[in-house]
Image: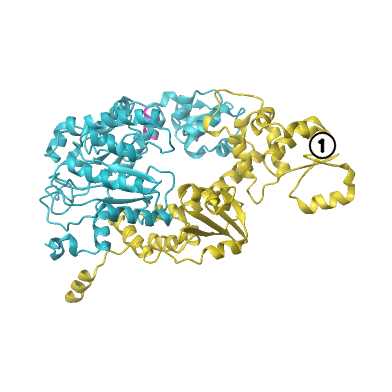
């Protein structure tokens, strides 16, 4: 039998349970479109979807925490508290462009009911998925650090370019930080609206047509002159005696320059240093010549 | 004397005042929030808009660039101006919030009133970001209470480790009364706010900053003071800033403190905070003058206690693992909860710095041969 699951936390956890219950099933995930289309043509009758099968009906009524408890049944009270959330782990790695849900199901089964094993990358396969989690989080943090959105009237618009599916996370983060204004995040062909409730949307963060954000950008850009003010502030924070190009380059990596012009300028000054030459000093130097 | 120093505030542009007043905070360390937004060429992160309310100051602290007797350019920003700049940088995602310090405007009470004005204004405007207020020694208790209503963090710099040193460098204030008593009040307020606060505002722990190398204070005193502050005032993270003499101050001819001292003190403070060490545990690694040397304190501690090693990685306790160079609190937890570890590769995947840990560990009965054992077996 072939069973089809959704590519999300519930789907992954249910697939784990299904493979435990039935030894002879093959599983596919619903956004593997080409594969599933082929399979539907090939053996339509044999495919059970997550929702329609009798065995799922029971599990569809389970909460995520009940599913987690079923898959991670060994409870170690001394386990690492802050690294205990399998839901967060699955949610994060599913965003990685190389994540294979089938492999992920295999990894969860190898944990043998111990959720902390997801965060202990002792073995090679576990290490790879742990790395995926870190790569996804790194991309998200880099966006939070270096993206500089622009304010148009009462709308804050950010342009990003992601390798993994993280732009909605960033939109959510920016919306939480600015709960009083509408947030727009444009990631190549995908656009997100944050604080959508301010515009009458039902959910806080939702995907919208890119043209919708273009219309919102029609107001005046309120950021004029701000970048100059930032440069003054940035330069004022630098202690010239403590210049440390190696550390600074590591902390503000070259990739930061791709996020915004402000971050690009900051990166440039990390490399070149910030001069403290004023017009007075320049005149003095000329007099000495 | 620069002709710039006597320009009245009203004749300075906003840009000039931002430059002057932000430069006045560049020695204050405050990286407490989760997201940094930029890094200066010195490698220090920028995550808050750091500014002084004013650099006019009635204090006479010997090391301070803003001391009243010093001939320097003076400027002020109004609460409205600070709020506006903070909002602009915040919307641009260039900062996470505001760090507000000040020169002393007449007396600490008046200064705290002005600081309160800024944070109240921002919160009333709906500002959701992080606010850290650096208070003046001697700030009255009722104003501390008021500021704690709005700020995420507020603290007073201790600067030094003893009353005698403090009264020498800050003649206007009393260490016991104006600093330590306030740190105690803040600790109590933070605990109370944390237990009773219902909204999402994060209340930070007490914090303070020390000037390293001022008056040749030994590192032993510094570590003891930090340990005491952690126990008494709930100090979570001390900040250290190497002393750099400022021209035009009474200490201008004093030598700068070496930069590595700051790093080693930070390392020692992490050992106190995250590794469960006590100040007395550092005794074997101080030199004759009570100072640290320019080496990683954890490696020096391991060298001073050779009988503790090698540690069997699969049976060691958490404390034993934490004492191994290259193993931190997170990797120690992982080792404890992992399956039996059989190779260095597994350790590396877990996050251990294997090259540093190798001389101090044993895996499945195998450990690195040490030169002293080699000689013993030879003889």
Can you say which quadrant of the picture contains the N terminus of chain A?
A: top right
Task: Tell me, yes or no, if residue B261 can be seen here.
Answer: no
Which chain is cyan in the rendering?
B
- Tell me, yes or no, if residue B304 can be seen here: yes
**Position in image of residue B351 (x %, y %):** 53, 38
Q: Is residue B94 left or right of residue B54?
A: right
> Residue visible at 43% across and 52% down?
A251
The correct choice, above or below, for B207 with respect to B314 in the image is below
| Residue highlighted by disc 1 | A53
Farthest residue in the front direction? A200
Q: Chain of mark 1?
A: A
Magenta region: B299-304
| Viewer-closest of B301 and A196 | A196
Above-or-below relation of A212 to B155: below
Q: Specify the chain shown as yellow.
A: A
Compared across the picture, whether B217 is left or right of B357 comes to: left
Name the one closer to the observer, B344 or B159. B159
Residue B124 percent across, percent down from the top left: 35, 46
State whether the magenta stretch is mostly helix, strand or loop: helix
Instruction: Indicate the secondary structure of the residue bearing disc 1.
Output: loop
Is A149 placed above or below B195 here? below
Residue B46 is situated, as x and y percent measured from the top left of the image, at 37, 51
Q: Quadrant of the C terminus of chain A?
A: bottom left
Question: x and y percent of residue B256 in the render?
Answer: 21, 48
**Residue B300 among magenta residues:** yes
Camera-nearest residue between A92 and B88: B88
């Amino acid at each position: 039998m072939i069973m089809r699951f959704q590519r999300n936390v519930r789907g992954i956890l249910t697939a784990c349970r299904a493979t435990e219950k039935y030894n002879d099933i093959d599983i596919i995930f619903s956004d593997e479109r080409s594969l599933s289309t082929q399979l539907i043509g090939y053996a339509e009758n044999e495919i059970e979807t997550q929702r329609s099968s009798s065995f799922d009906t029971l599990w569809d009524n389970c909460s995520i925490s009940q599913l987690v408890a079923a898959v991670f049944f060994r409870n170690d009270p001394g386990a690492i508290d802050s690294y205990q959330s399998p839901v967060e782990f699955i949610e994060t790695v599913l965003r990685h462009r190389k994540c294979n849900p089938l492999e992920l199901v295999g990894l969860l089964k190898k944990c043998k009911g111990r959720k902390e094993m997801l965060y202990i990358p002792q073995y090679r396969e576990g290490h790879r998925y742990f790395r995926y989690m870190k790569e996804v989080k790194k991309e998200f943090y880099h966006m939070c650090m270096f993206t500089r959105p622009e304010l148009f009237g009462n709308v804050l618009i950010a342009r990003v370019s992601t390798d993994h599916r993280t732009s909605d996370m960033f939109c959510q983060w920016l919306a939480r930080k600015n709960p009083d204004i509408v947030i727009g995040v444009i990631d190549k062909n995908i656009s997100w609206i944050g604080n959508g409730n301010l515009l009458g949307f039902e959910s806080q963060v939702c995907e919208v047509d890119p043209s919708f954000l273009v219309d919102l950008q029609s107001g005046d850009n309120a950021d004029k002159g701000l970048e100059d003010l930032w440069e003054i502030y940035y330069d004022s924070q630098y202690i010239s005696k403590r210049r440390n190009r190696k550390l600074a380059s590591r902390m503000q990596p070259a990739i930061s320059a791709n996020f915004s012009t402000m971050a690009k300028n900051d990166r440039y000054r990390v490399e070149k240093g910030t001069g403290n030459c004023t017009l007075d000093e320049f005149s003095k130097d000329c007099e000495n010549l | 004397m620069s002709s710039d120093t006597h320009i009245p505030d009203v004749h300075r542009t906003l840009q000039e005042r931002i430059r002057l007043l932000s430069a006045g905070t560049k020695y204050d360390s405050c990286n407490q929030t989760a997201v940094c937004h930029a890094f200066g060429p010195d490698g220090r992160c920028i995550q808050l808009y750091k500014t002084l309310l004013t650099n006019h100051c009635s204090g006479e602290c010997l090391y301070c660039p803003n001391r009243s007797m010093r001939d320097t350019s003076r400027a002020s920003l109004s609460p409205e101006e600070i709020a506006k700049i903070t909002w602009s940088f915040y919307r641009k995602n260039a900062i996470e919030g505001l760090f507000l310090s000040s020169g002393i405007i007449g007396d600490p009470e008046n200064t705290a009133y002005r600081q309160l004005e800024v944070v109240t204004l921002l919160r009333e405007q709906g500002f959701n970001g992080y606010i850290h207020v650096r208070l003046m020694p001697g700030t009255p208790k009722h104003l501390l209470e008021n500021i704690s209503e709005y700020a995420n963090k507020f603290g007073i710099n201790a600067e030094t480790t003893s009353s005698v040193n403090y009264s020498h460098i800050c003649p206007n204030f009393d260490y016991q009364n104006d600093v330590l008593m306030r740190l105690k009040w803040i600790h109590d307020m933070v605990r109370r706010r944390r237990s009773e606060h219902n909204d999402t505002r994060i209340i930070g722990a007490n914090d303070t900053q020390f000037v390293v190398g001022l008056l040749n204070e030994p590192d032993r005193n510094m570590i003891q003071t930090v340990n005491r502050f952690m126990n008494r005032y709930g100090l979570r993270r001390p900040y250290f800033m190497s002393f750099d003499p400022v021209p035009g101050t009474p200490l201008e001819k004093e030598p700068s403190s070496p930069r590595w001292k700051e790093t080693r003190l930070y390392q020692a403070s992490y050992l106190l905070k995250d590794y469960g060490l006590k100040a007395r545990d550092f005794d074997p690694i101080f030199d004759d003058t009570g100072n640290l040397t320019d080496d990683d304190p954890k490696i020096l501690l391991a060298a001073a206690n050779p009988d503790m090693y090698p540690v069997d990685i699969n049976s060691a306790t958490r404390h034993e693992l934490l004492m191994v160079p290259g193993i931190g609190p997170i990797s120690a937890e992982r080792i404890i909860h992992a399956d039996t570890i059989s190779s260095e590769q597994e350790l590396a995947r877990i996050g251990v710095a294997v090259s540093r840990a190798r001389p101090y560990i044993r895996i499945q009965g195998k450990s690195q041969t040490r030169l002293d054992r080699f000689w013993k077996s030879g003889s």
